[in-house]
Image (cartoon, grey):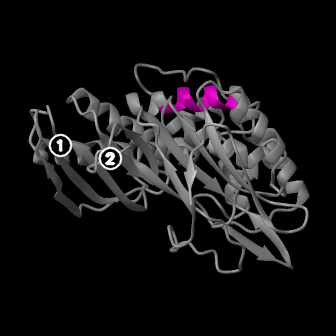
Amino acid sequence: MKKTVSMVLGLLLLLTGCGERDRFIQISGHAQGGVYSVKLNLRGVGVSPETIRDSVEAILTDIDTTLSGYNKGSLLSRFNAGEAIRPNALFLNMYDAAYAWYERSGGALDFAAGPLFDAWGFGFREGEMPSDGEVVSLLSSGGMHLLPRELPLEDGWLDPAGLGFPRLNFNAIAQGYSCDVVAKYLYSLGVKDMLVDIGEIWCDGHNPSGLPWSVGVDRPFDRPDDGSDALGKDLDGIWQSPGGPCGIVTSGNYRKYYIRNGRKYAHTIDPRKGYPVEHNLLSATVVSPEGAADADALATWCMVIGLEESRELLLSGDGLEGYLIYTAEDGTMAEWATPGFTLKQ
């Protein structure tokens, strides 16, 4: 959630018609280690673009100073360092959501398994490959199962010492959650057409061309260069929004991994077992009407459980749509989609 103050506020398009004018603007800058973009229609909104820009900036700053594991002064980082904190609503809401996802996923999503990710080199700290014994130790000493469903506050303070000094990591839903918080603010202004992109995406309504929003779905690759800067370089297709509110998130193992002694170690760790996953699912794209955080969690969950269980998960959810890309038995790349997932080549 690294963030700078650079910002662009621009007019995208002005459409005139029989009724009130469509007037789209774009707000963009840097947040959470990347670039974010918010596109919205000012039709019927009585707030200036500058006010919206400043408010979005303030929201992202609040999230960064609360939930970022990379900002050493954030509430999360201070808590993880063993410091007593006064958690705000963002922190408490995130913890509540994280515990609910932990329970729903049967432990496939564990937001207190940060030391495991660190040990494998995919967390907030650099780590070396752990031994089997170290994995067993980490599994027994950390995890949401050791934490209470509701955080115990004393006069508004939360002391990690009373919880056994856990280390929390909300990366699996933080970006999606950020989209939802920004979208909630825009809805409060009366915005009906929006696309909020903060690494993950929330969209509603139509774009400046009057069509439902479209989002590119990356095609996975498998090469020693992890391609971290190649987002959008090779698209598998274009997803077409149905026009209503929904979050869309892609999670995959093809960008963050390393190869050691000829073996590939993906960044997705199964917190139930303590080891990187070794299945043939390359990426999972999830569309959820419940929010970008919902889609974010589900996409990560899919990457933990693999292809077959992911199919069952996506087909079991009301309103859920999904698109899975995997390696077939013959070594070629194959795809599977729920009936309502629309992808144009």
Name the residue at 62% across, 58% down.
123
Quadrant of residue 5 within the rendered picture: bottom left
* Residue that carries the numbered disc 1 in the rendered image: 52
In the displayed structure, 93 sits above or below 345; it is above
Q: In this view, does 170 lie to the left or right of 57?
A: right
- Alpha carbons under labels 1 and 2: distance apart: 12 Å
Q: Does the magenta stretch include residue 338?
A: no
Between 148 and 246, the one lying in front of the other is: 246
* Residue that carries the numbered disc 2 in the rendered image: 60
Q: Tag 2: Cα neighbours inside 10 Å, few (<14), some, or many (≥20)? A: many
Between 46 and 3, the one lying in front of the other is: 46
Instruction: Report x, y in % for residue 130.
Output: 81, 62
**Mark nearer the N terminus (1 vs 2):** 1
Q: How many marks?
A: 2
Name the residue at 74% across, 39% down.
108
Q: Give the range drawn in magenta.
A: 94-102
In the displayed structure, 151 sits above or below 72; it is above
Name the residue at 24% across, 33% down.
191
Q: Is mark 2 on a helix, strand or loop?
A: helix
Q: Is residue 319 left or right of residue 61?
A: right
Q: Is residue 96 magenta?
A: yes
Q: Which amino acid does label 2 sit on?
A: Leu
**Residue 111 appears in the figure:** no
Q: Which amino acid does label 1 sit on?
A: Ile
**Residue 51 appears in the figure:** yes
